[in-house]
Image (cartoon, rainbow, N blue to C red):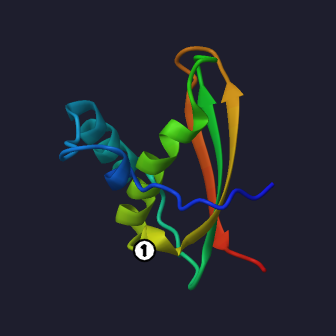
Amino acid sequence: MRIWIKPLSVNEAFRGRKFKTEKYIEFQQEMLLKLPKMDIPEGKLEIHYKIGFSSKGSDLDNALKQLNDCLQKKYGFNDNLIYKIIAEKEIVKKGQEFIEFKICQKEF
């Protein structure tokens, strides 16, 4: 199904400046330390995520922006090159939360 409407950006959806919380800054620092070295393909990108949440109430899409921002910062690409995201949610026990990802060149 296609709906003909212009999507809203985060900047258009909220008023005022958004400030990073201390929790987000700590998350970003930890992610940047834990992310492995890897080469990012040229051109349009596709990212596959599998995210382990300990709460069934966690929204999968709420995690994606922060993850994309961390990946772009670590690997030096512009996130406007992400053309496809495949994301999966898995429920795990508390303390066993995780993030898996794969970055590849988008295939047509």
From this view, report whether residue 97 is shown above or below residue 93: below
At label 1, counting other C-alpha atoms closer than 10 Å, the crowd grade (few under 14, some 14-19, many 20 or more) is some
The residue that appears at 64% across and 17% down in the rendered structure is: 56
Q: Which residue is located at x 49 percent, y 40 percent?
A: 63
Q: Is residue 45 left or right of residue 34?
A: right
Residue 61 pos. (x, y %): 56, 40
Quadrant for residue 45, please give it: bottom right
Residue beneath the point at 18% across and 47% down: 17
Q: Is residue 95 left or right of residue 3?
A: left
| Residue 5 quadrant | bottom right
Image quadrant containing the C terminus:
bottom right
Q: Nearer the viewer, residue 81 or 72?
A: 81
In the rendered image of this protein, does residue 57 appear above or below residue 41?
above
Quickly name the residue at label 1: 77
Q: Position of residue 75 (x, y in %)?
A: 42, 69
Foreground residue among 59 and 67: 59
- Up-down relation of residue 14 to residue 35 (above or below): above
Q: Quadrant of the N terminus?
A: bottom right
Q: Give the secondary structure at mark 1.
A: loop
